[in-house]
Image (tube, rainbow, N blue to C red):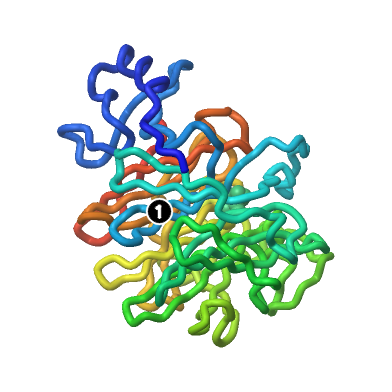
């Protein structure tokens, strides 16, 4: 376990360049600015809204939760393994997970060490991608996508008695699960839902009517956009209860998006949160790099597109989570500030604000 203080390496140049408002830790509020958090620059002079939460390892795809009053972050653990970059994301060649935690945004971050390693997942082949976590009845569940030994992504589950792990993986993937980026949401009635899927390297285009076809390619611009998937979780939290359904996302006129609407259509990185009784389904548009959201009246949708939460970050991928802690809402996200490399990312956090009508104020990650 490692407790890390906020690195002064990134604060000093910012302080010199922009004055004392950049001297605050990541996530603290800048006086007089209700929308944004820290504004600071690195040694290259680039300005960032927030600073990396940790810099001793590369982390991405942060799924944050509040367990026992503490913030736990379940990120991917990026490493450089020498795999060349391609359109399928082969360079995201991750081997294990670390769990991070902190008492409050802006406080010291603890790295709890390896929580689960790919070598301890009996069915895994390669590429341990974006995880999520859930808690019920004394057990913590870690959900993760990984390619099986035939190079097909499925979603696995591992359990622990502690939020930081170590986690023990089930021997097989969750039956009927596929593709990537699980998000597990607990509704107020205690039911859990998993949202998942990602196109291109996430292989969702190969799954039609829940059947796998390795030859199925990406959709063309005039075709309907591929939709994310969802399923209710069984009480054992290790199986789906009921069918795997598409998550319907429509525009303000109730029309579905086409593949050519790639600044709004779903690509990957599902997240679900509830605000004032409404269900907010958020996701990445992938090749156009937006983090968007759509609102619905039920966890099953349909969801109506509302706008952009986070404009494109530095790097190719964008991935996030949204939580409430002590009456404030936070967006966890990542960019490549520390490395400048697509596949070596770092997680960040900033405050998120709603308008009176329930819309989310768009955040610009670099000012
Ligand atoms: O980290 C690997 C993949 O990159 C994730 O699964 C996607 O959401 C993207 O962030």
Q: Position of residue 5 (x, y in %)?
A: 36, 32
In the depicted structure, whether residue 35 falls above or below residue 309:
above
Foreground pick, 189 / 230? 189
Q: Which residue is mark 1?
A: 72
Please, which residue is most extreme toward the left here? Answer: 32
Where disc 1 sits, the SS reads strand
Identify which residue is drawn at 70% across, 73% down: 172
Q: Position of residue 12 (x, y in %)?
A: 35, 16
Q: Is residue 126 visible?
A: yes
The number of numbered badges drawn on the structure is 1
Foreground pick, 296 / 54? 54
Foreground pick, 196 / 23? 23
Q: Position of residue 30 (x, y in %)?
A: 22, 33
Identify which residue is drawn at 41% across, 67% down: 304
Please, which residue is most extreme toward the bottom here? Answer: 242
> Image quadrant of residue 343?
top right
> Image quadrant of residue 105?
top left
Q: Position of residue 40 (x, y in %)?
A: 35, 25
In the depicted structure, whether residue 323 falls above or below residue 155:
above
Label 1 packing within 10 angstroms: few (<14), some (14-19), many (20+) = many
């Amino acid at each position: 376990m490692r407790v890390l203080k906020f690195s002064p390496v990134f604060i000093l140049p910012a302080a010199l360049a922009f004055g004392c408002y950049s001297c605050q830790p990541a996530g603290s509020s800048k006086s007089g600015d209700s929308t944004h958090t820290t504004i600071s620059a690195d040694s290259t002079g680039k300005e960032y809204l927030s600073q990396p939460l940790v810099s001793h390892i590369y982390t991405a795809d942060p799924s944050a939760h509040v367990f026992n009053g503490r913030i736990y972050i379940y990120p991917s653990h990026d490493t450089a393994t020498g795999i060349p970059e391609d359109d399928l994301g082969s360079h995201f060649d991750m081997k294990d997970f670390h769990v991070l935690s902190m008492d409050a945004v802006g406080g010291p971050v603890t790295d709890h060490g390896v929580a689960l390693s790919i070598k301890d997942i009996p069915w895994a082949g390669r590429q341990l991608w974006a995880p999520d976590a859930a808690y019920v009845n004394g057990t913590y569940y870690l959900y993760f996508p990984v390619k099986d030994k035939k190079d097909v992504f499925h979603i696995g589950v591992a359990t622990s008695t502690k939020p930081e792990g170590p986690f023990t993986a089930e021997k097989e993937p969750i039956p009927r699960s596929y593709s990537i980026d699980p998000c597990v949401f607990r509704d107020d009635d205690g039911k859990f839902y998993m949202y998942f899927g990602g196109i291109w390297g996430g292989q969702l285009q190969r799954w039609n009517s829940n059947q796998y076809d390795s030859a199925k390619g990406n959709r063309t611009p005039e075709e309907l956009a591929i939709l994310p998937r969802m399923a209710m979780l069984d009480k054992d939290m290790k199986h789906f209860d009921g069918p795997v359904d598409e998550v319907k996302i429509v525009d303000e006129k109730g029309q579905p998006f086409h593949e050519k609407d790639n600044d709004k259509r779903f690509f990957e990185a599902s997240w679900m949160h509830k605000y004032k009784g409404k269900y907010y389904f958020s996701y990445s548009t992938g090749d156009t790099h937006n983090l968007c959201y759509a609102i619905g009246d039920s966890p099953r949708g349909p969801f109506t597109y509302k706008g952009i939460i986070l404009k494109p970050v530095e790097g190719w991928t964008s991935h996030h989570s949204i939580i409430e802690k002590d009456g404030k809402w936070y967006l966890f996200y990542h960019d490549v500030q520390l490395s400048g490399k697509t596949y070596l990312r770092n997680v960040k956090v900033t405050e998120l604000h709603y308008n009176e009508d329930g819309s989310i104020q768009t955040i610009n990650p670099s000012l």
